[in-house]
Image (tube, grey):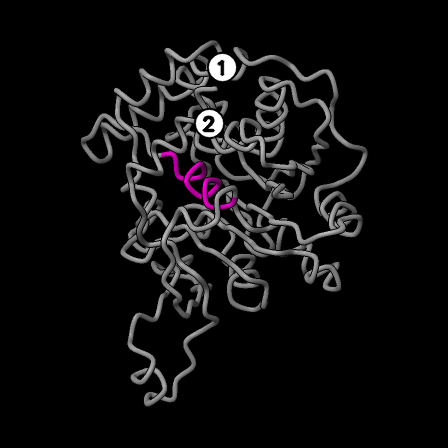
C-alpha cells in the first residue's frame, strides 16, 4: 500500500486527482488538507469534502489550511479557468459528506498523521505550497517521515498565469522556494510542460462518462475547463494537471524523470514565481562556480498514451 496525504485546492483537475486516489486500491489515503488557490479556502474545502463523498470516503480526515500566501497576499484566483465555485458551477451536483472537517488545522493534521506513520508517507501537494512550507517550518523533525513529495507545479518553458510562472508556484513563491529549494526531502516536480502533453480528448471523456454514474459526474465538472482550453490554446481538450501528478504518486515511474537543479524566483517583477531549471551539463555548472539550486526529479516525459489509459482505467471503475 502507498500511504498518501493530499494537499489540494479543488479545482477541476484536483477533483480528478482526488478521485484517482480514491479509486486506486493500492492507496492508503491517510488524509486530505486544503489550501487557497483555484478558488478561496472555504470553497476548496467544500469541494474536497464533496469529491470524497462521491466516493463514499467519510473515513478520510480533512482539514483546512492556509487561506493566503506566506508573504504577499493577493486576490488572484483561477475562477476564469475553473468557474466561480471551482467546479464549473457544478459543485452542488456532488453529494454532501456526512462527516465534516477534522477538529484541527491542516498543518496539525499532517503532523499527527506523519508522527503516527510506521512507514514513509508520500505527500502530494497539488496546489500552492503554503501548507507544506508551514509544516516543514513548524515540524522540521517530521521531514524524515516523508518518503516523497510529488508536487504538481512549475513550468520549465514558460508560464500559464504569467509569461514566466505557473499558477501553483506563482501563488506563493516563497513557500515554493522553501519546499523545492531549501529542503532535502526526495521530491518530484510535475510541471505543465508534461501535463499539457497528457491532455485528454473528447473521446476519452466520452469513455469516462459511459463508465457509470461517477464517471458522468466527473465529466460534467469539466464544462468550464474545456471552454477555457478551447479559448486559451485552441483545442477541445482537458488538461488534468493534478491527476498526472497523482498518477506518479500512485505508480512511481509512470513518468520519466530528469534530475535538474532548481531555483524559484521570489523577487517582485515579471519573473516572480518562475521555476528556473539549470539544464546545463554538470561540467558547465561546475566550471561556472555559480550555485544553481537543489537537484529535483522533474517529470518531463512519459508514455503519454499509457498515462491516459492509467487514468481512465482507475476513474472508470
**Measured along the vertical axis of the image, is residue 215 above or below residue 248?**
above
Q: Residue at x 26, y 26 (%)?
A: 201
For the residue pair 8 and 185, the one nearer the viewer reads as 185
Residue found 45% across the figure and 28% down from its top: 12
Q: Nearer the viewer, residue 114 or 267?
A: 114
Q: Please determine whether, in this image, residue 273 is positioned above or below residue 249.
A: below
Q: Seen in the image, is 298 located left or right of residue 74? A: left
Crowding at label 1, few (<14), some or many (≥20) Cα neighbours within 10 Å?
A: some
Q: Is residue 242 magenta?
A: yes
In x, y percent, where is residue 41?
Answer: 60, 34
Q: Residue at x 51, y 45 (%)?
A: 249
Query: Mark 2 — residue?
Result: 314
Q: Which residue is mark 1?
A: 214
Label 2 crowd (10 A; few <14 / some 14-19 / many >=20): some
Task: Write down the region rendered in magenta.
Answer: 240-249
Residue 192 lies, in percent from the top left, at 34, 47
Q: 138 or 201, which lies in front?
A: 201
Closer mark to the observer between disc 2 and disc 1: 2
Is 141 located above or below residue 305 in the figure? Answer: below
Quadrant showing the N terminus:
top right
- Picture coordinates of residue 197, whole percent (x, y): 27, 42
Amino acid at each position: 500500500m502507498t500511504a498518501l496525504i493530499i494537499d489540494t485546492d479543488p479545482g477541476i483537475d484536483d477533483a480528478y486527482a482526488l478521485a484517482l486516489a480514491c479509486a486506486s486500491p493500492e492507496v492508503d489515503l491517510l488524509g486530505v488538507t486544503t489550501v487557497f488557490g483555484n478558488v478561496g479556502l472555504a470553497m476548496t474545502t467544500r469541494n474536497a469534502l464533496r469529491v470524497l463523498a462521491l466516493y463514499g470516503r467519510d473515513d478520510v480526515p480533512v482539514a483546512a489550511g492556509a487561506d493566503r500566501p506566506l508573504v504577499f497576499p493577493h486576490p488572484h484566483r483561477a475562477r476564469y479557468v475553473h468557474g466561480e465555485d471551482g467546479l464549473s458551477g457544478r459543485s452542488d451536483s456532488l453529494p454532501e459528506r456526512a462527516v465534516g472537517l477534522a477538529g484541527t488545522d491542516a498543518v496539525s493534521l499532517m503532523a499527527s498523521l506523519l508522527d503516527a506513520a510506521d512507514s514513509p508517507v508520500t505527500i502530494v501537494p497539488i496546489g500552492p505550497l503554503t501548507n507544506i512550507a508551514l509544516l516543514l517550518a513548524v515540524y522540521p523533525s517530521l521531514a524524515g517521515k516523508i518518503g516523497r513529495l510529488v508536487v504538481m507545479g512549475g513550468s520549465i518553458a514558460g508560464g500559464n498565469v504569467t509569461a514566466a510562472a505557473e499558477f501553483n508556484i506563482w501563488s506563493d513563491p516563497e513557500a515554493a522556494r522553501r519546499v523545492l529549494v531549501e529542503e532535502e526531502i526526495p521530491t518530484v516536480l510535475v510541471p505543465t510542460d508534461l501535463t499539457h502533453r497528457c491532455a485528454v480528448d473528447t473521446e476519452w471523456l466520452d469513455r469516462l462518462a459511459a463508465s457509470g454514474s461517477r464517471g458522468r459526474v466527473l465529466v460534467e465538472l469539466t464544462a468550464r475547463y474545456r471552454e477555457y482550453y478551447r479559448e486559451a490554446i485552441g483545442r477541445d481538450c482537458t488538461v488534468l494537471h493534478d491527476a498526472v501528478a497523482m498518477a506518479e504518486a500512485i505508480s512511481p515511474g509512470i513518468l520519466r524523470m530528469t534530475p535538474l537543479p532548481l531555483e524559484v524566483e521570489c523577487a517582485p517583477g515579471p519573473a516572480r514565481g518562475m521555476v528556473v531549471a539549470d539544464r546545463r551539463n554538470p561540467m558547465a555548472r561546475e566550471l561556472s562556480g555559480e550555485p544553481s539550486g537543489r537537484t529535483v526529479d522533474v517529470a518531463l516525459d512519459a508514455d503519454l498514451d499509457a498515462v491516459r489509459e492509467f487514468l481512465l482505467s482507475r476513474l472508470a471503475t
